[in-house]
Image (cartoon, rainbow, N blue to C red):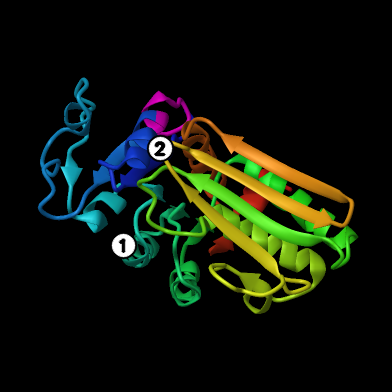
Amino acid sequence: MTHIPGIVITGASGRMGQMLIRTVTDSDQARLVGVVERTGHDWVGQDVGVAMGGAALGVTVTDDPLEAFAQAQAVIDFTAPEATLEFAALAAQARCVHVIGTTGMSDEQIAALEPASRHAVIVRAGNMSLGVNLLVQLTKKVAAALDEDFDIEVIEGHHHHKVDAPSGTALMLGEAAAEGRGVDLAEVSDRGRDGMTGARKRGDIGFHAIRGGDIVGEHDVLFAAPGERIVLRHLATDRAIFARGALKAALWGQGKAPGQYDMVDVLGL
């Protein structure tokens, strides 16, 4: 019988954590072998299924990630930047595929993943959905085809609980637009407009964040020139798309050489 990879989910009690748990347990391609929460959390020591308000799943929530990772072939991690760096070192020690959906990571924190990637597969993406990753590729192509007569604006919307802005997906889209134009996003990014800002600088890539209600994720890339506009849009209505993409990445990473990958690699785009 083909070996079915064991998966650990970190941040089990969060909305994405619970969605990931359901996605893995519903899959016939993976097994849930561990779930991790921070020390002192109410769920630690409980069966995760019971903690989620359902039937027992036979997996106890732990605050010892290394113990959990030692039983697994992959870790799926949608937590916080500091926790993700800690998990990366432990996943590398256990030689697990580490799928990172954590957003809000600084350039320095992303660079700090390099040592772990020498020993294990890391798949990191600001968004795990197929549609968004297609949008990223389209954004790059459109930006490459249009000159600076077209202003580029990235507009994103999320639920009112989201703590980082711009979203990881918005930054992916901004990077794609910058790459298409052959410029460094850090040099052309415009993230704040308030008061008498003056005219828009030619060639800038603007970002705007909307926060409200239960918006799962909405992203527009606007290319605006005198007399015409092009709008590329992706609307997410169910965060299960991110969980399914993350599981796909965890399965794809099995047997791959250590290194850093993204969803473009996973999806073969």
- Residue 256 seen in the current view: no
Q: What residue range appears in magenta?
A: 23-31
Determine the residue positioned at 70% across, 76% down: 184
Q: Is residue 107 magenta?
A: no
Question: Amino acid under label 2?
Answer: Gly
Counting residues from the N terminus, which is met first, the one under dot 1 or under dot 2?
A: 1
**Would you place residue 236 above or below residue 268 in this image?**
above
Q: Mark 2 packing: few (<14 Cα in 10 Å), some, or many (20+)?
A: few
Q: Residue shown at 47%/45% (left/top)?
A: 158
Q: Is residue 60 left or right of residue 266?
A: left
Residue beneath disc 2: 213
**Label 1: which residue?**
83
Residue 111, x across and y down, in percent: 49, 75
Secondary structure type for disc 1: helix
- Mark 1: which amino acid? Ala
x and y percent of residue 86 in the render?
Answer: 31, 66
